[in-house]
Amino acid sequence: AQSVAQPEDQVNVAEGNPLTVKCTYSVSGNPYLFWYVQYPNRGLQFLLKYITGDNLVKGSYGFEAEFNKSQTSFHLKKPSALVSDSALYFCAVRDPGSGGYNKLIFGAGTRLAVHP
Amino acid sequence: DTGVSQNPRHKITKRGQNVTFRCDPISEHNRLYWYRQTLGQGPEFLTYFQNEAQLEKSRLLSDRFSAERPKGSFSTLEIQRTEQGDSAMYLCASSWDRVTDTQYFGPGTRLTVL
């Protein structure tokens, strides 16, 4: 079955330090991968996506993610964390069985807490 | 471009009542998705519209749920005879008509069934 795993419920990091939020996936074929962020009482905001090409993808707010096909991972990274980055982060993969459209399968989310 | 909007933002209802939610996608986006998010979980796919046609419904969408997208613009999601297990955040997303296109989400409607 197609799935996404976010192995950490919560990640704690000090402001100014680099952060990594982990994501692994299991899908058939070439994956389309996404990261979204959710602030309290808000919908999901798109950060970045990998479709094809360069394994390092740059996105909004200084975030980037590295696609690693051999490890089936798509970890989200930022060189220097801000307190305002504290939020819930979701990794998602396109369900390859969704035909010509883009049904997403989400991980359970990782809460990022950045401490001053 | 005002983004995806959803109304109401919050809905509290008693078990057995019917509720209806509305989603207004980004203008000219012809793809529209509904997802449901329960506490501590990621969103789960409910249904998909290509213009006005509903092309897929998840098994999560029981017979009590119905969704429409008349004229391929806004969409409504109705839940009949609500149950406490229906309590969740209902999210709408829209995108252009390409597989690689990004889905943009609305703020969601939080449903609480008492």
Image: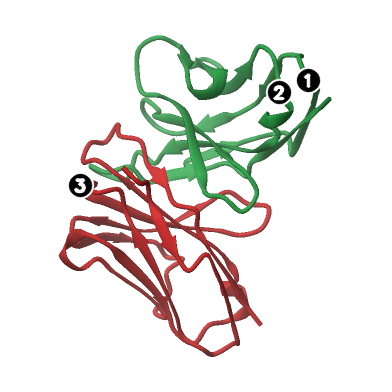
Q: Is residue A43 above or below residue B96?
A: below
> Which of the 4 image quadrants contains residue A28?
top left
Residue picked out by circle 2: A82
Q: Is residue B45 left or right of residue B30?
A: right
Type of amino acid under label 1 = Glu
**Chain letter for the part of the structure drawn in red:** B
Q: Colour of chain A?
A: green
Quick one: B64 or B97, which is closer to the camera?
B97
Residue pictured at 53% horizontal, 18% vertical: A65
Q: Kindly tell me whether residue B32 is visible in this rendering.
A: yes
Q: Is residue A20 above or below residue A87?
A: above
Mark 2 or mark 1, which is nearer the start of the sequence? 1
Q: Kindly tell me whether residue A63 is visible in this rendering.
A: no
Q: In the displayed orientation, state which residue is furthest to the bottom.
A: B16
Residue picked out by circle 1: A15
**Quadrant location of the N terminus of chain B?**
top left
Type of amino acid under label 3 = Glu
Disc 3/disc 2 C-alpha distance (Å) = 35 Å
Instruction: Name the spot of residue A108 as percent of width and height, x first.
Output: 62, 45
Q: Is residue A61 left or right of residue A20?
A: left
Q: Residues within 10 Å of mark 3 (few under 14, many from 20)?
A: some
Q: Residues within 10 Å of mark 2 (few under 14, many from 20)?
A: some
